[in-house]
Image (tube, rainbow, N blue to C red):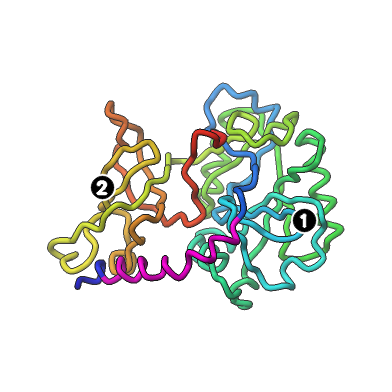
C-alpha cells in the first residue's frame, strides 16, 4: 500500500471512531460573512482592519464554537471570566502560522503549551443591537474590562481612497498578513454575505473537496502528485502545485476540504492557475438555506 493509500485508510478508520463526537456539534452559528472588495465602494463608510489568518471562533456566552458548529476545547483558563455576551473573533497564532492555529483548535484534548501561543482577536458582538460604529466601541470596552492578554480587540482605521487602501494592503501583505477586512460603519450585524463586510486580498481563493490522491511521477514518485477536487458547485479539477514535501507525504484526507488560490476563471468556470493553499477543517459547504 502506498503512503497516500495508508493515509486514506487511516482517515477512514478515524472517521468511524470520530462519528460519535459529531453528536456534540450544534447548528452552525449565524455569523456575518464577507463578500469581496471591488473598486467603487464608498471607503469613507468603512472601517478597515487586518485579515487574520486563523480559525473563526464564536463565543456563545458559555463556550467556543467553530464557524461550522463544532465545539472547540480550549483549556479552562483560556475562557475563564468571559462574559455571557456572544463574541465573534478569530483564533490566531500569528502571521504565517495558520497550521499551528488550526492544529491547536482541532485537538480534542487541549495542548496547554499550544494554546499559550493563541490569541482571540475580537472583531464583533453579534447580539449587540447597534450599528458597527457602536459595536466597535463596545467590543473595545469589553476587551479592556476583561483584561486578558490573549483576548485582543482588533484595531480599526479609515482610508479615504482606493490608492491609500492598496498601499495598506501591500504593507500588511509584505509583513506576512493575508489581507484586509472592510466593515461598513452603519451596518447592523446580519448573518448574510454582502457589502456590509468585505475582504480584500492580493489573490482569489476558494474551497474544494478532496476526491482522490493522484500518484506522483519523477521526483514525486511514491507520494502525492496532485489532488483531484470538486467545488461546492460540482466543478472538478486537479491541484498539482503549492504542496510542501511533507504535505505530499501526508496529503489531506479524502472527503476533506481544502483552500486553493487562483487567478481568475476560464469560460468553463474552472479556476486559472489553481494552487493548493491549506486544509480547511472548519469549512462547511453552503446549502440552499445557507447565507451566501
Mark 2 or 1, nearer chain start = 1
Residue 103 against residue 241 in the figure, above or below: below
| Tag 1 secondary structure | loop
Residue found 42% across the figure and 67% down from its top: 16
Q: Residues within 10 Å of mark 1 (few under 14, many from 20)?
A: few
State the CA–CA distance, disc 2 to disc 1: 42 Å
Instruction: Find out whether residue 50 is within the magenta segment.
Output: no
Which residue is label 2 attached to? 238
Q: Quadrant of residue 191?
A: top right
Determine the main secondary structure of the stretch shown in magenta: helix
Disc sitting over residue 32 in the figure: none
Q: Quadrant of residue 3?
A: bottom left
Horizontal and vertical percent position of residue 123: 70, 47
Disc sitting over residue 61 in the figure: 1
Point out the frontmost of discs 2 and 1.
1
Q: Nearer the viewer, residue 46 or 173?
A: 46
Left or right for 11, reference 143: left
Horizontal and vertical percent position of residue 205: 42, 42
Residue 247 against residue 86 in the figure, above or below: below
Horizontal and vertical percent position of residue 6: 27, 71
Q: Which residues are magenta?
A: 6-25
Q: Nearer the viewer, residue 12 or 111?
A: 12
Left or right for 175, reference 10: right
Quadrant (top left, top right, bottom left, bottom right) of the C terminus = top right
| Tag 2 secondary structure | strand
Q: Quadrant of residue 7?
A: bottom left
Amino acid at each position: 500500500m502506498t503512503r497516500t493509500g495508508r493515509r486514506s485508510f487511516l482517515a477512514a478508520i478515524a472517521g468511524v471512531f470520530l462519528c460519535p463526537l459529531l453528536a456534540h456539534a450544534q447548528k452552525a452559528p449565524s455569523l456575518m460573512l464577507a463578500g469581496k472588495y471591488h473598486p467603487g465602494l464608498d471607503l469613507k463608510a468603512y472601517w478597515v482592519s487586518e485579515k487574520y489568518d486563523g480559525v473563526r471562533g464564536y463565543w456563545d456566552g458559555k463556550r467556543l464554537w467553530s464557524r461550522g458548529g463544532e465545539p472547540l476545547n480550549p483549556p479552562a483558563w483560556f475562557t475563564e471570566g468571559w462574559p455571557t455576551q456572544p463574541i465573534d473573533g478569530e483564533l490566531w497564532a500569528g502571521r504565517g502560522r495558520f497550521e499551528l492555529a488550526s492544529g491547536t483548535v482541532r485537538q480534542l484534548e487541549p495542548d496547554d503549551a499550544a494554546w499559550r501561543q493563541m490569541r482571540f482577536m475580537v472583531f464583533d458582538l453579534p447580539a449587540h443591537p447597534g450599528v458597527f460604529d457602536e459595536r466597535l466601541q463596545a467590543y473595545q470596552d469589553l476587551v479592556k474590562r476583561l483584561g486578558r492578554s490573549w483576548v485582543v480587540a482588533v484595531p480599526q482605521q479609515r482610508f479615504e481612497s482606493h490608492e491609500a487602501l492598496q498601499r495598506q494592503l501591500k504593507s500588511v501583505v509584505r509583513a506576512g498578513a493575508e489581507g484586509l477586512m472592510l466593515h461598513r460603519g452603519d451596518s447592523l450585524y446580519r448573518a448574510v454575505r454582502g457589502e456590509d463586510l468585505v475582504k480584500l486580498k492580493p489573490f482569489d481563493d476558494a474551497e474544494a473537496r478532496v476526491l482522490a490522491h493522484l500518484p506522483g511521477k519523477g521526483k514525486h514518485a511514491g507520494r502525492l502528485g496532485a489532488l483531484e477536487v470538486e467545488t461546492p458547485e460540482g466543478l472538478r479539477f486537479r491541484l498539482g502545485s503549492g504542496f510542501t514535501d511533507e504535505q505530499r507525504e501526508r496529503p489531506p484526507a479524502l472527503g476533506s476540504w481544502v483552500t486553493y488560490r487562483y487567478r481568475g476563471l476560464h469560460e468553463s468556470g474552472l479556476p486559472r492557475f489553481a494552487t493548493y493553499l491549506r486544509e480547511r477543517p472548519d469549512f462547511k459547504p453552503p446549502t440552499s438555506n445557507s447565507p451566501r
